Image (cartoon, rainbow, N blue to C red):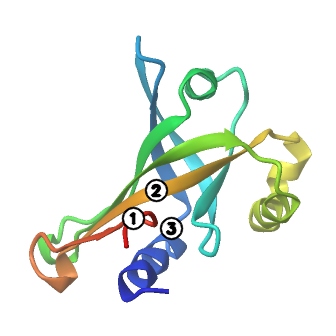
Amino acid sequence: MSKDLEKITSFIAKHHVMSLATTDAKELSVCSLFYVYDAKKLCFVVASSEDTLHVKHVVENAAVAGNILLETQTIGKIQGLQFQGKMKELADESLKKLYFKTFPYALAMLPKLWRIEVDYFKLTDNRLGFGKKIIYSPASP
């Protein structure tokens, strides 16, 4: 794993809620979702009902963007991750187990699980220097 991806993965592991933006080309939606992350598969797992606007968008257009942030008023401690990818219905049993191990109370609700396959990360980390950006894309050499 590259040093940049290690920093990104470390940041992701310290949090558990993301904001996710979707569109169907007619309207936009943003929501907050609990997540788990699989560093080897470069994907998030989230739970969401098919009745939600963001899932209705994903059925039309799988492209999503999101962010995870550290809420702070101290400029030198600002950290935030932006990502882009594709959101699809989850079929991977090992990822389902990972989600319910992390959020066991969710099992009682029998939620539909989704996989966000990430193809772009941008981590801003002011601890490394003001406005320092770490960009990682699995498709890049």
Asked if residue 70 can be seen in this view, the reply is no
Q: How far separated are the C-alphas under marks 2 and 3?
A: 20 Å
The answer to whether residue 93 of the structure is visible from this angle is yes
Could you say where residue 57 lies in the image, as x and y percent from the top left?
55, 23
Amino acid, disc 2: Asp
Residue at position x 60%, y 42% in the image: 87
- Viewer-closest of 116 and 101: 116
Residue at far left of view: 130
Verify CB contact (< 8 Å) between mark 2 and mark 1.
yes
Q: Identify residue for label 1.
A: 137
Task: Give whichever of discs 1 and 3 has the lower sequence position.
Answer: 3
SS class, disc 3: loop
In the rendered image, residue 109, in percent from the top left (x then y), is placed at: 86, 41
Left or right of residue 60: residue 9? left
Q: Residue furthest front?
A: 141
Where is the C terminus found, in terms of image quarters?
bottom left
Residue corresponding to mark 3: 15
14 relative to 102, above or below: below
The residue singled out by tag 2 in the image is: 119
- Label 2: element kind: strand
Q: Earlier in the sequence, mark 2 or mark 3?
A: 3
- Residue type at mark 3 is His
Q: Looking at the image, is mark 1 or mark 3 nearer the viewer?
A: 1
